[in-house]
Image (cartoon, helix red, strand yellow):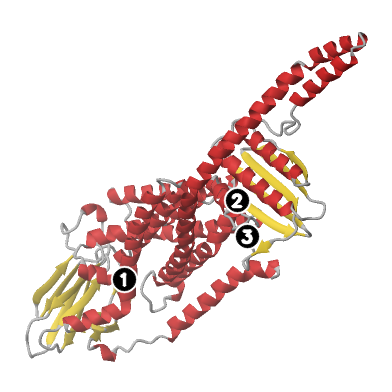
Amino acid sequence: MNKGFRGILPLIFIAVLTSLLFAAVLAFQPDKQASGTDSITEWQIDDETVDLPLTVKQLPPRSSLTLTTEIQPKKGDYLYLKTVYAPLRLYANETLIFEYGQQGSYPGFLIDPPTRVALVPLPDTADSVTLRMEYLSPAQRNSIVLHPVLLGSREAILWELIGQMGFSLFFSFVLLALGILLFLTAFVLTRFETEGSAFFWLGLFCVCVGCWVSGECNLTGLLIDAPVFLYLLAFLGLFTMAVPILKFGYRTLGLQRESRRLLNGLTAVLEICINAAIILQLTGSVAFSKSMYLFHVVVPLSLCVFAAVLLRESAQYQNRMARKFLIPTAVLAVFSLLEVCNYYLLHLPVQKSFFFQIGVFVFVVIIGVIGGYFVRDAFLLRAQNGIMQQQIKIQREQYQLLLETEENRKRLRHSVKHHLAAIRILLVNHEQEAALADLNAMLDKLSEDVTGRLCSNSLVNATAMHYQAMARQAGATADIRLDIPEDTGSIPDSELCVIIGDMLENAVAACRGAENPFLKMRSRCADGILTITLDNSYSFIRQNADGSFQSTRDGGGLGLKVITALAEKHGGGSRFEAKDGVFYSSVYMQMA
């Protein structure tokens, strides 16, 4: 597939998904007559007939607004009503049947009463009922939103609301449960894999979004009669949900230093904004409902920047983890922009946060698939750990013998001049037979199996020398030059030996049977990044449909998977490519 076309596939996917979503929303027309409820939309304000919903603008704070209408209820009917940041008194035939948001009924630092939904029973009467709603406009807004009132039986009203908002309520509970599950997964995985912390940040994101969606959902207000709690739940969930996503990005995806700094800076800005919004709310200066407009900008902007960073990392630096999370993050960013556009411009007849819920749903599904593979690979790596440790133990013993041999060779070299001096004396004295015997004895003690030093790290040097000897015994030309210090930072010597040993072992196995067999390994240590490359010839290769490679060892193997897993564990990655009879391997890791 053409690389340019492959690069725009995510954009095509997002465009198609967005088009289908808009078509579904615009084509959906709910059947209001079949629900068994009536929407009371026609009211009188100062002898003027108005239709709800209605936004009355240019009102001074705490302005009084009275609406009246006449209804013909059935026995056992209820009213469903909603008031947004406005105190309300509801009268039926001049009898007060509902009151909310009066001074002293909510904490003073909230400034305005939180949004409230309620089911209010009507008096049993066969006659018509005159309703009067007395509102006081919000203190921090110059407008008031008047919502329609539903009339019907309790069950009919609930079923209609479930039809409108049931998905949001169910999805919020799913997100909260998923967040808890991810917390538990992180707790288990971090005991043997530090990358398990990624599940913690994803779980925290799910909890934040779940809090926002459940706090915004009117059905939640009917289940939990705690408007202040739901108010805090909704706004704090909205304000904080981008923070764990950004922390997940710069802490677990192995991004470049400048990318990590950018995301870290964005996170700091968000945290400052959140703290400022909380302080302003607690002091009664600016309510969350006003601070919300700032977060309508910074949250989508943060998600868009994060998606752009992942695109740059995957394209410019070939970051495999960034490539995996690019599409779900881009979907999340696009749908956050759609949510803001719908709030301010489109005003489509959908539940608040509907578009963002769709984006989160797509994000969670894709992340779930990626997370499943991560857990599988983590447990696979753990299952192989015992075998790997045993192999390392055996290799350590072999390498120790090689090191002892090298030390013996150094001691023999030190004494060579003494032997040569003795031989010279024997030759001067014409004792050729004695000189020849002494020379043969000296040569027998010199080891020809292990020569030279390939790097400064003793254990890695022994590993490389071991496989260099194996390659030469197999008839291959082995050229190994490594720049690896004794102190490899956060990378244990044992894991580094596994990576280099597996790379060389695969190369030696692949060289057998190849024409002009060779292997060439190089490494470079700079700016805290260790890079290892290996080129080798091969006689044949096994490649899967997805482009990955199978081991050529008898019975298969996990060499390349283990190399990749260990590289990603240390904030790096790996790449393998076969071309024109040469297999190219490259691995990079962060040593700090």
Q: Amino acid at mark 3?
A: Gln
Q: Position of residue 214 (x, y in %)?
A: 30, 65
Quadrant for residue 523, please give it. Answer: top right
Q: Is residue 289 left or right of residue 478?
A: left
Quick check: 145 above or below 549? below
Quadrant for residue 472, please give it. Answer: top right
Q: Secondary structure at mark 2?
A: strand
How packed mark 3 is, by other alpha carbons closer than 10 Å (few <14, some 14-19, many 20 or more), is some
Q: Which residue is mark 3?
A: 550
The mark nearer the N terminus, 2 or 3, is 3
Residue sitting at x 64%, y 41%: 530
Q: Position of residue 118 (x, y in %)?
A: 19, 72
- The label nearer to you, 2 versus 3, is 3
Q: Are marks 2 and 3 in contact (CB under 8 Å)?
A: no
Residue 435's disc is none
Q: Position of residue 561 (x, y in %)?
A: 57, 54
Residue 170's disc is 1
The mark nearer the N terminus, 2 or 1, is 1
Cα distance, mark 2 to mark 3? 18 Å
Q: Is residue 255 left or right of residue 218?
A: right
Quadrant in which the C terminus appears: top right
- The label nearer to you, 2 versus 1, is 2
Q: Secondary structure at mark 1?
A: helix
Residue sitting at x 87%, y 9%: 425
Cα distance, mark 2 to mark 1? 39 Å
Q: Secondary structure at mark 3?
A: strand
Quick check: 341 above or below 272? below
Q: Position of residue 409 (x, y in %)?
A: 72, 24
Q: Nearer the viewer, residue 103 or 552?
A: 552
Q: Nearer the viewer, residue 1 or 462?
A: 462
Q: Amino acid at mark 2?
A: Gly
How packed mark 1 is, by other alpha carbons closer than 10 Å (few <14, some 14-19, many 20 or more), is some
